[in-house]
Image (tube, rainbow, N blue to C red):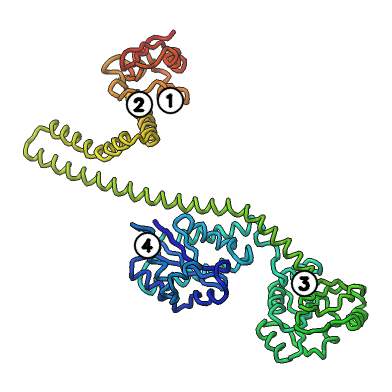
């Protein structure tokens, strides 16, 4: 599986270049067609915002990653009518780095405003566009790509829930809104006055409306602009600047953001309004450059004044807090990336297992048909079964044997140890199963286990002493279920050539104090001490 992302953002490009590389719906459709037509993508995600333009591409099988990524880059340049030299204003990341970048973008860690939440919604919109495009063409979005996007959104949600990355205001308008919410009672009837139909005031008004404050009054020199402001906001009332004193009376929040060269709200005006209000608390926010509000009003009873300098200082502190929160976000991102990669490995492994089992089953069917034909020809049953079992064993073991031989040749000790551990565990399980089966037979009930060919384990492959001891010491041996049977006379094939008396003494201790006799390749249990 290969992943590639190419993009340009606010750090690399100026506004002019960002405009050139923005994706319209038409350009997005065109690039999707281009990537599919040239076999460059099994799926792609195109993210286009005011601060970034990115193309994230996924393909299951890629022979030459460098060549593949270069072809995608050229396709992006072609869509935007750019030259090769313009690539220096793009970044490119492959595979794990590409995935990490996508997760960071979704969590707001790569945004101009660190931690801003809008990007997650923009990625969702991009995925919706991809799904509709592929659905129209009768193409199915790969399940592993869907899982990647799902993990991306889940990660972004956890980062916002468990860290403070998005909990501190980092814009002056939002900072003003937060202060207002904190300082005033939660009363939706609070009268709010906004002086000036500026974009700053519009952004602030939207914050207020989202928080349930709807008694919003817009005062502006141009009544038409004030009307347009209210229509775009979808709430509030509008007034001319001539009505300012009347509108200010009874207000609890006042925001001013105009382009005036002189004070719009001077000392005398505010003093008169406060007197009419009974000097109740009123918060004034001066968001203009130069100032709209006379600083002297802060000496009036009940007045609290915040200007851009106050607010900017608070914003800078909050930006620093968000930067610190990045360190808390990275472990969460790594957790989701690891989970996605683990799921992919499991699915890929399952495909291999299914393929191998199907291969072995086909061998079984072929050999079984040969055995049936041999029986129909009148061949001896025992010989047919012997031939069938030997051939099937060889077929089953052929591929694993080649793999183990390769491990040995290449000195892959770790892989060999894993196989050895599996064999050892399998020996313990086989020993336990055979012994349990034998002990359950009536012939062994209420009597000793016979030595020699009748000993229940004599035909097993040799088991290691420490494995045998481990089985007893952890109560995993069938003897614990058959207290009426003595170990006297039991013969167990065991690798004892290289074991000292210390290991054999362990057998005595765990096996009901029976004495043991060590012979080459086997252990015989004797009477109790």
**Vertical comparison of 317 with 260: above or below:** above
The residue indicated by pointer 4 is: 68
Q: Are marks 2 and 1 in contact (CB under 8 Å)?
A: yes
The residue indicated by pointer 3 is: 308
| Label located before the other in sequence (2 or 4) | 4
Q: Disc 1 versus disc 4: distance between alpha carbons?
A: 54 Å
Q: Are marks 2 and 4 in contact (CB under 8 Å)?
A: no
Of badges 1 and 4, the one in the foreground is 4
Q: Disc 3 versus disc 1: distance between alpha carbons?
A: 75 Å
Which residue is more in the foreground, 479 or 249?
A: 249
Which residue is more in the foreground, 43 or 132?
A: 43
The residue indicated by pointer 2 is: 431
The residue indicated by pointer 1 is: 471
* Circle 4 Cα neighbour tier, 10 Å, few/some/many (<14 / 14–19 / ≥20): some
| Label located before the other in sequence (3 or 2) | 3
Q: Disc 2 versus disc 4: distance between alpha carbons?
A: 54 Å
Q: Name the residue located 43 percent from the left edge and 16 percent from the top edge.
A: 503
């Amino acid at each position: 599986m290969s992943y590639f992302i190419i993009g340009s953002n606010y750090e690399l490009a100026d506004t002019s270049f960002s405009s050139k590389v923005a994706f319209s719906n038409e350009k997005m459709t065109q690039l999707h067609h281009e990537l599919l037509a040239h076999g460059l993508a099994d799926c792609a995600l195109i993210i286009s915002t005011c601060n970034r333009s990115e193309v994230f591409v996924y393909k299951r099988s890629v022979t030459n990653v460098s060549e593949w990524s270069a072809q995608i880059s050229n396709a992006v340049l072609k869509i935007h009518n750019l030259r090769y030299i313009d690539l220096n204003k793009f970044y490119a990341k492959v595979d794990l780095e590409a995935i990490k970048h996508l997760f960071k973008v979704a969590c707001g860690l790569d945004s101009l405003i660190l931690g801003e939440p809008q990007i997650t919604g923009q990625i969702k919109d991009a995925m919706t566009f991809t799904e509709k495009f592929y659905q129209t063409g009768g193409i199915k979005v790969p399940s592993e790509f869907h899982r990647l996007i799902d993990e991306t959104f889940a990660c972004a949600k956890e980062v916002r829930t468990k860290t403070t990355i998005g909990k501190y205001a980092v814009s002056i308008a939002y900072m003003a809104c937060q202060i207002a919410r904190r300082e005033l009672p939660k009363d939706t009837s609070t009268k709010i006055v906004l002086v000036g139909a500026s974009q700053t005031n519009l952004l602030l008004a939207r914050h207020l409306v989202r928080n349930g404050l709807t008694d919003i009054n817009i005062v502006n020199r141009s009544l038409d602009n004030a009307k347009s402001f209210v229509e775009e906001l979808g709430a509030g009332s509008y007034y001319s600047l001539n009505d300012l004193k009347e509108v200010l009376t009874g207000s609890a929040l006042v925001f001013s953001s105009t382009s005036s060269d002189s004070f719009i709200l001077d000392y005398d005006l505010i003093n008169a309004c406060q007197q009419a209000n009974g000097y109740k608390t009123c918060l004034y926010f001066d968001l203009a450059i130069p100032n709209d509000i006379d600083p002297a009003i802060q000496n009036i009873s009940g007045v609290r004044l915040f200007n851009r300098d106050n607010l900017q200082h608070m914003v800078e502190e909050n930006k620093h807090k968000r930067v610190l929160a990045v360190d808390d976000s990275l472990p969460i991102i790594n957790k989701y990336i690891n989970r996605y990669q683990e799921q992919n490995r499991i699915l890929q492994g399952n495909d291999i297992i299914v393929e191998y089992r199907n291969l072995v089953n086909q061998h079984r069917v072929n050999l079984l048909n040969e055995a049936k034909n041999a029986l129909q020809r009148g061949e001896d049953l025992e010989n047919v079964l012997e031939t069938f079992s030997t051939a099937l064993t060889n077929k089953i073991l052929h591929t694993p044997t080649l793999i183990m031989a390769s491990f040995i040749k290449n000195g892959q000790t770790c892989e060999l140890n894993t196989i050895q551990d599996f064999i050892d565990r399998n020996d313990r399980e086989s020993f336990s199963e055979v012994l349990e089966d034998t002990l359950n037979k009536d012939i062994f009930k209420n009597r000793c286990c016979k030595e020699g060919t009748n000993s229940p384990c004599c035909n097993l492959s040799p088991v290691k002493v420490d494995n045998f001891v481990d089985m007893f010491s952890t109560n995993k041996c069938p003897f614990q279920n058959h207290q009426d049977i003595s170990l006297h006379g039991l013969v167990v094939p065991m690798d004892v050539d290289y074991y000292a008396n210390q290991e054999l003494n362990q057998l005595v201790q765990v096996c009901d104090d029976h004495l043991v006799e060590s012979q080459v390749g086997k252990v015989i249990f004797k009477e109790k001490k």
